[in-house]
Amino acid sequence: MAKIYLAHSLRDADLAKEIELRLQSKGHRFTYAVSTQPFGNWRKKLADALRSADVIIPLLTQNGLQSSFVVSEIGAARVYDELRGMLITPIIFGENVNIPSFIDDYHCFFLRSSGAGDIDVIVNQIHTVISQYSDEMLKNPRIFISHRHKDVKIAEALLNLLESAFHIEKIDIRCTSVQPYTLPSGEKTSEKLRTEISSAEVVIGLLTPDTRESNYVIAELGAAWGCNIPTFPLLARGATYEHVPEPLNERHSLSLQKESDCLQLIDDIARESSLTRRTEVSGRVTRDAKNLSEIANEL
């Protein structure tokens, strides 16, 4: 199912919550829950939630149209639509509320009333559109692992750790050298990877002393930095801070050569992504973290 961002005015929170609950019951996930209280750098949290969504639903009421945040989020969504095909499904609600010119080239859904029956009708229509929407657009990975293929053993050990810590389907991760996370046959590699990086929730860079010899890894990490996607430089095989390419060297790096850093990586991914953690697997996670650190120390 899709990852959805619901753009709405705070004054319309009750209606937005009803829409959210019904779409959740159909299996969709929301990148930022309507009932979530803003805290910390809330602008960044909302921007990250919008960027990581497959679908944006702007709730265009009188309140919504008067909200500079809702309007700016639609503007950002239009850019994401151009870049990677984000689905934009506006809902129009309220007397004398017409389709605004800045969104009139998109199909809009008209909500007749805030009654449960009318909300059900709109939600069913949107669910149908999402279900019919291109599977390719809705199946970009949440985690993108950039690495040299010669470091496949480290990538495999990292994936084992992630699979132990999180509920993962093969569409959740792109790792071009490890099955089942490789590219589908027939894909145009550069275009597909560029699209997937721009829509990923987290990009992981496996860095070794000779990573700079790979133009692909440097380009992929640079693209992630340019898209302001959370990017984790991970050091292995004797790599140090000096081996982190600019401008990623401005960010804190973790060393896969340390078991404690491998475990911290799980917490960091849980914080930045929408992956669901497994429960009661601490022993398995610790085992795989130790194995990853041992392989990452192999020169």
Image (spheres, rainbow, N blue to C red):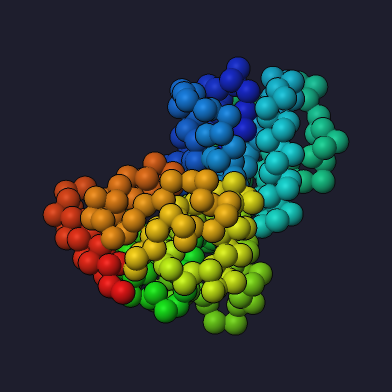
Question: Residue 78: where, in percent of width, then height?
Answer: 73, 46
User: Residue at image x 46%, y 23%?
Assistant: 39
Asked whether residue 241 is in view, the answer is: yes
Q: Nearer the viewer, residue 96 or 299?
A: 299
* Residue 261 in picture, x, y percent from top left: 29, 51
Percent across and percent down for residue 118 are 59, 32
Q: Residue at x 18, y 55 (%)?
A: 286
> In the rendered image of this protein, does residue 243 appear above or below residue 60?
below
**Total marks in image:** 0
Which residue corresponds to the image point at 74% horizontal and 54% vertical from the top-left?
82
Q: As rendered, which of 154 and 172 lies closer to the eye?
A: 154
Relative to the observer, which residue lies in front, 279 or 243? 243
Image quarter of residue 272: top left
State which quarter of the image contains the C terminus. Answer: bottom left
Q: Is residue 204 left or right of residue 229?
A: left
Q: Residue at x 50, y 41 (%)?
A: 31
Q: Quadrant of residue 150?
A: bottom left
Residue projecting furthest to the right: 101
* Residue 169 shows up from this direction: no
